[in-house]
Amino acid sequence: MNERAFERIHVLAVFAGKQSRDYVYRVTPLRFRRASGERHRIRKIRRVYRDQKGARVYVHFVVETEESRFFDLVFDPNASIWKLILEVDSSAMIEWDGDACSA
């Protein structure tokens, strides 16, 4: 991952020791602030996936904000840094319903 190509962001997140009813993931972003000062509260985590580049592992969170905007945030657990990878157009989001998907 090209570290310089992405916007560094400030994220308020919960780091849980184990899964619970309130926190399904060990790391759960709740809201974030961009360098411009723009703030977003996360309504829903749509997808979580890992991306390994050499020895480093990055954790991606595709999130939906309260304004119905979608972002791909990445957490680097080795450096404890969050970055904004991209904003996803809502028309590109696919609902996954177990065996079937719908756009």
Image (cartoon, rainbow, N blue to C red):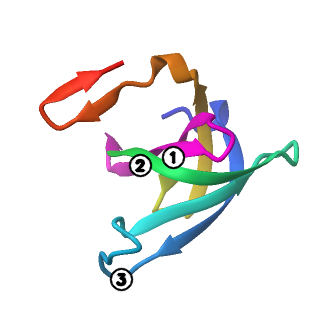
Residue 98: x and y in percent read 17, 38
In the picture shown, does residue 2 fall above or below 11? Answer: above
Query: CA gap, disc 3 to disc 2?
Result: 19 Å
Numbered label attached to residue 88:
none
**Residue 79 visible within the image:** no
* Label located before the other in sequence (3 or 2): 3
Per the image, label 1 sits on a secondary structure element best described as strand
User: Which SS does the magenta portion mostly show?
Assistant: strand
In the picture shown, does residue 62 fall above or below 88? Answer: below
Question: Pointer 2: what residue?
Answer: 58
Residue 5: x and y in percent read 64, 30
In the picture shown, does residue 92 fall above or below 67? Answer: above
Numbered label attached to residue 74:
1
Bounds of the magenta segment: 50-72
Per the image, label 3 sits on a secondary structure element best described as loop
Q: Which dot, 1 or 2, sits closer to the camera?
A: 1
Circles 1 and 2: CB distance less than 8 Å?
yes
